[in-house]
Amino acid sequence: MTSGDVSRLAHVPSYAGTVTSFTMVIFLASTSAFMPAPVLTELAQSFGTTVPVMGQLTAVTSLPWAIAAPLFGPVSDRYGRAPVLMYGLLALGLATVWSGLAWDLPSLFAARLVAGVAAAAAMPTTMTTVGDLFAGIQRARALGWVNSGFSIASLVGLPLIALAAGLVNWRLAFVIVGVCLLLLEFPVVRMLRHVHASKGDSGPRVGYAGLLRSPGTLALLGANVSERVLFGAVTTYLPALLVERYSISISAVAPLLSVIAIGSLAGNLVGGRLSGRLRTVHLFGICQLLAAVCAAFVFFGVPYLWLTALLAAALGCANAASRPTYLALVMAISGKARGTMIGMFSLTNHLGLTLGAMLGGFTISWAGYGAVAGLVLAAGAGAALISQGGEPRDRPAEPQ
């Protein structure tokens, strides 16, 4: 580790404290962003509308998130991570409480729109700050832990939302998550106050045009779109596939979906430990091919439900194992424009997930669930192939 790296870390309270705080940010922010999903029926009953109408809350959150994320990246590069993260976290907490107190449908949709913009500020900036604080293998491992917050939200956060809504009501669930986000401000503010370099590295800034011309950038972003197409198709249509193919109830699907979250959680942690053992793009390519093969078997059809669940867990693990080192590489090649790069990375996340849902729906309507096997194989192979141009061999090695 260089003297610059030491100066960045010298006043961070502790590695464990830093990683835990940022993991909690991702966990709570992810829970807030996606919490309408498990309570759509209750929301529809409360506001006298239908489940499909309430389902648009996801789009109302995701669209401003996708648009705003690339805008907040350059702001954090120029003015610092701390203000963007803190104001984003504050706004997300308030918007989540507002959601729980919404008095009519327009006020709820407005609250979720604000939540989407706030999440676009808080979540990518959290990942970028981890990239600022750590380098080399330590960065990949820290990102593995922090990125696991997404999986923990799916595995723990959203089921708890459904439980709270069932025991009391959905409003209490929103308010509790919002208050937790607001309380999280205190440890995060305290931690960031001790970090000297809370903005990107010093030196001239690099704009979008310059960043896109950098070797490997387009390949990394393109591979991310293709990988998210695979993931989007799986997460969107797997529940319906399980219900229709195995004749089970929707309530029985929830525990089966948890195996993907468990696999993803394990994959994030394993992926961080694999840093330095393989070239990042090789690890990414292998993981995407494994995930694509597992997904193809799931959609093409296997005779046993337990085998489908096992394949889904392997899919989640393989997919997630590629993410920590891949994110670390994205941050490494972006240099002084780390926030800008992560903003574009977030945009490609949403683009890929949207394309996965759209292409998956078209494929199912055209040829049935089995044909989605071809889509996920193509997406996984595309991600593996495109990514190979994302790590120039002459890139200077980072400090470990």
Image: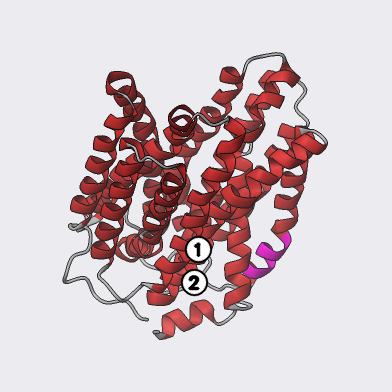
Query: In the image, is residue 319 above or below residue 162?
Result: below
Q: Which residue is nearer to you in this view: 87 or 284?
A: 284
Instruction: Specify the segment rendered in magenta.
Output: 186-191
Please name the residue shown 67% across and 63% down the image.
189
Image quadrant assignment for residue 36: top right
Give the x, y percent position of residue 146: 53, 62
Front-most of 74 and 248?
248
Please name the residue that numbered disc 2 is placed on: 133
State the CA–CA distance, disc 2 to disc 1: 6 Å
User: On the rendered structure, is 372 left or right of 173?
Assistant: left
Q: Quadrant of the N terminus?
A: bottom left
Is the stretch drawn in magenta largely helix, strand or loop?
Answer: helix
Q: Residue at x 71, y 26 (%)?
A: 42
385 to the left or right of 197: left
Point out which mark residue 129 bears. Answer: 1
Amino acid type at image mark 2: Leu
Q: Are marks 2 and 1 in contact (CB under 8 Å)?
A: yes
Q: Secondary structure at mark 1?
A: helix
Specify whether residue 188 is painted magenta.
yes
The residue lying at 64 percent from left, 27 percent from top is 40
> How many numbered dots are placed on residues in this image?
2
